[in-house]
Image: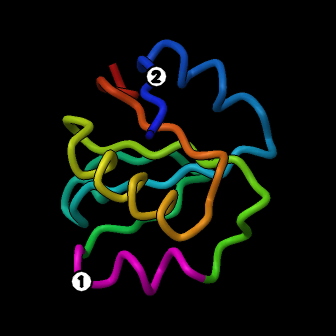
């Protein structure tokens, strides 16, 4: 089950340099504004291809605009054996 955190909680986590941030918004949303250390995983068809090479031992924070797309990718990551995955509910830019 994917752990959900608030945007406020995410901002605290994002201060940790070991956290890997995955942005699941569209390319247009990314170009408008993004977190400097975030990895863009925006095309649903490529999610698995982009996720498989990632280190399963690291901790991941996923977000999108609403939390739905990132929740979907977080579930996929858990199905692939990633254990340290959290999804942000809310706007990390607010």
Name the foreground residue: 80 vs 27: 80
Q: Earlier in the sequence, mark 1 or mark 2?
A: 2
Q: How many badges with numbers are in the image?
A: 2
Report if residue 47 lies within the magenta region: yes
Q: Give the vertical position of 63 relative to 26 (above or below).
A: above
Question: Along the horizontal axis of the image, is 78 left or right of 25?
Answer: right
**Which residue is depicted at the point 26% across and 50% down?**
32
Q: Give the vertical position of 24 relative to 61 (above or below).
A: below
Q: Which residues are magenta?
A: 44-52
State whether the magenta stretch is mostly helix, strand or loop.
Answer: helix
- The residue where tag 2 is placed is 5
Quarter holding residue 76? bottom left
Question: Along the horizontal axis of the image, is 35 left or right of 64?
Answer: right
**Which residue is depicted at the point 38% across and 68% down?**
41
Which percent across, then down, holds residue 83?
65, 51
Which percent across, then down, holds residue 33?
34, 46
Question: Along the horizontal axis of the image, is 52 left or right of 66?
Answer: right
Tell me the colour scheme of the image: rainbow
Helix or strand or loop: what does disc 1 sit on?
helix
Which percent across, then down, holds residue 27?
25, 66
Mark drawn on residue 45: 1
Quarter holding residue 17? top right
């Amino acid at each position: 089950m994917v752990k959900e955190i608030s945007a406020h909680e995410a901002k605290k986590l994002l201060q940790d340099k070991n956290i890997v941030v995955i942005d699941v918004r569209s390319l247009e949303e990314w170009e408008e504004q993004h977190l400097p250390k975030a990895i863009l995983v925006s095309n649903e068809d490529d999610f698995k291809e982009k996720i498989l090479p990632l280190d399963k031992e690291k901790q991941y924070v996923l977000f999108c605009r609403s939390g739905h797309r990132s929740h979907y990718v977080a579930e996929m990551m858990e199905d692939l054996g990633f254990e340290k995955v959290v999804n942000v509910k809310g706007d990390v830019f607010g």
